Image (cartoon, helix red, strand yellow):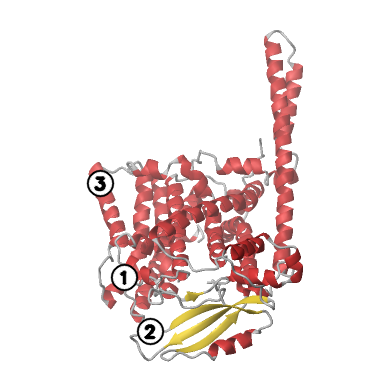
């Protein structure tokens, strides 16, 4: 009975988890099992010592035990007692022989004078039902992991060997050069330099592909403090800060879901600084804007340099345009798919395990068209842009969605995650990339106009983040706000990129372009993929609800951020970086790999 959950306190403070103790129930089961009594586990011995210290006598239960979680819906006609339908999670330590149906019937038979309850589901984490080795997805993941590990180790050893050979030949060449300076022959030096070229140029496509998995080269590539001439350095800062903002927002959502004092959220949501959490949804718009900008800017830069000519040589305009478009999509697909598929497999496996073993429930254009048909393409782009605004506004209006700080996630599934709400920011990003290309990163602007631009940008950003604090919007004004807010945010991000890239960034440019941010930016994609896995892993390994507090949430956020980036670094070295290098090797503008 001591391991089973019961009402203790904070029911009106939002405590819906009467979980008891799954660990204690497991220890009680250890106490009963004869084999385990002869070979006691450490935690069982600690429990025995604790009982003896308190002068508690008696043996363990005369039966094997298991932990059950009953999900119970509670209602009442007395709104003074329970204002809304509550879903309680009741933990019970019962004989392992009890079936889920029997536990459900037992809970359903309980009576309370003022309450009506209905058993929604019964789960038993200790009964299991899922094993990793029996899952084909896990076996595939295990095989892929072993294969990639072998490739990483082999490629790294091969890379180090080549580097040593190169160093030895260079040392010999230096010694021969010194000898020539003293009157020696030049023939040996020429032969040694030719041997150096034979080493520094990888022998064949397969050697180059193998070297793509070199951990040494990939780590150096991630931590490289230089950027290419075709890049926009401020992107690194925007990526890094936005990713941290995303993790912060998702951390708060997880804490809210599994807290025993969820009513505190209603109080926190009324605070001024809580608007930073609510406004984390705009970090997604930053990524959409950056994506549109980079695709457009890099495409035009690559096309101007003639690097796409080899791909489309000998084809008609339409065919070459289609090939360029497919090449662009194929490159992005190939670059992003490897880590994405691996993380998808990890998510599938872990979510299956959580569903059977966790105490808590788991929480789911082509270049030729534009110059020849500019008016048509511009009109269609404008129509799509306006349609995204009107669609977002209409969805907000039809659902009576009023953006406010007291209940910010009510329309999460209708507004936040829908693609039409993100089209505007992406098109704004494409426009930003086109402006950067057409101006060649050079825009003359007086300090007055630059100051005006920054003032408008800062004012708009502050309004979007804190503007809803203690503000009540009508249905129409809320629809207008929902329709325009995402594109306005992207427009401000576009201004920051343009201003910083054309010499009008002031102190913002060195902040966003700081080399220390480059490694974090380069693993942003993997961090975006892996951080939900880390969040779920932590939440699903809880056996008791979280007691929410500002300091606790902040410390949890810091820990989750560090773990997420550490794992993202591993995933990037193993999957993303090798794929990027291999794509460079097989691309039309291929260059030989040198150490």
Position of residue 462 measured from the top left corner of the image (x, y, whole percent): 29, 57
Q: Which residue is label 1 attached to?
A: 404
Residue at x 31%, y 74% (from the top left corner): 402
With 344 as the anchor, is 164 left or right in this view?
right
Q: Earlier in the sequence, mark 2 or mark 1?
A: 2
Furthest residue to the top? 183
Of 346 and 114, the residue lying toward us: 114
Q: Which residue is label 3 attached to?
A: 451
Residue at x 47%, y 40% (from the top left corner): 515
Q: Earlier in the sequence, mark 2 or mark 3?
A: 2
With 90 as the anchor, is 42 left or right in this view?
right
Position of residue 433 measured from the top left corner of the image (x, y, whole percent): 43, 52
With 37 as the anchor, is 536 left or right in this view?
left
Secondary structure, mark 3, is: helix
Position of residue 547 measured from the top left corner of the image (x, y, whole percent): 44, 65
Separation of marks 1 and 3 at Cα, in angstroms? 31 Å
Near mark 3 (Cα within 10 A), the count class, few <14, some 14-19 or many ≥20, is some
Separation of marks 2 and 3 at Cα, in angstroms? 55 Å
Above or below, 35 against 77 in this view is above
Q: Looking at the figure, which quarter contains the N terminus?
A: bottom right
For the question of whether residue 373 can be seen, the reply is no
Near mark 2 (Cα within 10 A), the count class, few <14, some 14-19 or many ≥20, is some
Of 489 and 585, the residue lying toward us: 489
Above or below, 183 against 262 in this view is above
Determine the image quadrant of residue 215: top right
Separation of marks 2 and 1 at Cα, in angstroms? 25 Å
Position of residue 529 measured from the top left corner of the image (x, y, whole percent): 55, 59
Near mark 1 (Cα within 10 A), the count class, few <14, some 14-19 or many ≥20, is many
- The answer to the question of whether label 2 and label 3 lie on touching residues, with beta carbons closer than 8 A, is no
Secondary structure, mark 2, is: loop
């Amino acid at each position: 009975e001591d391991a089973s959950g019961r009402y203790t306190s904070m029911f009106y403070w939002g405590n819906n988890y009467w979980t008891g103790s799954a660990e204690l129930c497991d220890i009680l089961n250890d106490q009963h099992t004869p084999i385990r009594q002869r070979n006691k586990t450490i935690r069982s011995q600690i429990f025995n010592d604790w009982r003896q210290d308190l002068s508690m006598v008696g043996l363990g239960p005369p039966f094997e035990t298991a932990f059950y979680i009953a999900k119970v819906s509670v209602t009442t006609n007395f709104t003074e007692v329970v204002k809304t339908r509550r879903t309680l999670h009741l933990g019970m330590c019962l004989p392992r022989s009890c079936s889920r149906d029997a536990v459900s019937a037992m809970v359903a038979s309980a009576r309370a004078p003022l309450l009506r309850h209905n058993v929604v589901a019964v789960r038993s984490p200790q009964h299991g039902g899922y094993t990793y080795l029996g899952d084909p997805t896990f076996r595939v993941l295990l095989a892929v992991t072993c294969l990639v590990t072998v490739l990483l180790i082999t490629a790294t050893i091969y890379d180090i060997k080549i580097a040593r050979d190169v160093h030895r030949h260079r040392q010999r060449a230096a010694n021969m050069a010194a000898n020539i300076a003293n009157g020696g022959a030049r023939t040996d030096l020429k032969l040694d330099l030719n041997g150096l070229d034979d080493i520094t140029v990888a022998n064949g496509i397969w050697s180059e592909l193998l070297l793509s998995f070199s951990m040494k080269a990939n780590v150096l590539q991630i931590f490289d403090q230089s950027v290419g001439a075709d890049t926009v350095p401020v992107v690194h800062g925007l990526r890094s800060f936005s990713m941290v903002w995303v993790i912060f927002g998702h951390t708060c959502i997880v804490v809210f879901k599994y807290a025993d004092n969820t009513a505190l959220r209603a109080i926190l949501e009324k605070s001024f600084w809580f608007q930073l959490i609510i406004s984390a949804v705009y970090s997604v718009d930053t990524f959409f804007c950056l994506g549109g900008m980079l695709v457009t800017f890099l495409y035009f830069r690559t096309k101007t340099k003639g690097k796409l000519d080899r791909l489309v040589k000998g084809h008609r305009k339409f065919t070459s345009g289609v090939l360029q478009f497919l090449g662009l999509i194929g490159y992005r697909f190939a670059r992003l798919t490897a880590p994405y598929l691996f993380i998808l497999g990890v998510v599938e496996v872990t979510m299956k395990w959580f569903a059977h073993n966790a105490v808590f429930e788991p929480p789911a254009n082509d270049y030729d068209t534009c110059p020849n048909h500019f008016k048509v393409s511009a009109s269609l782009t404008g129509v799509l842009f306006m349609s995204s605004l009107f669609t977002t506004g209409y969805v907000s209006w039809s659902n009576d969605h009023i953006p406010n700080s007291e209940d910010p996630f009510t329309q999460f599934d209708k507004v936040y995650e829908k693609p039409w709400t993100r089209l505007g920011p992406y098109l704004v990003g494409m426009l930003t990339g086109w402006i950067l290309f057409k101006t060649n990163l050079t825009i003359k602007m007086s300090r007055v106009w630059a100051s005006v631009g920054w003032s408008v940008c800062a004012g708009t950003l502050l309004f979007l983040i804190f503007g809803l604090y203690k503000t009540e919007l009508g249905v129409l004004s809320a629809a207008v706000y929902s329709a325009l807010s995402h594109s306005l945010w992207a427009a401000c991000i576009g201004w920051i990129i343009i201003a910083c890239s054309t010499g009008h960034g002031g102190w913002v440019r060195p902040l966003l372009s700081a080399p220390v941010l480059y490694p974090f930016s380069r693993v942003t994609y993997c961090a975006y993929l892996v951080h939900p896995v880390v969040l779920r892993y932590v939440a699903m390994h809880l056996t008791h609800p979280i007691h929410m507090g500002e300091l606790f949430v902040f410390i949890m956020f810091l820990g989750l951020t560090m773990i997420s980036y550490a794992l993202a670094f591993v995933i990037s070295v193993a999957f993303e970086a090798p794929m990027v290098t291999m794509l460079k090797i097989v691309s039309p503008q291929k260059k030989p790999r040198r150490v």
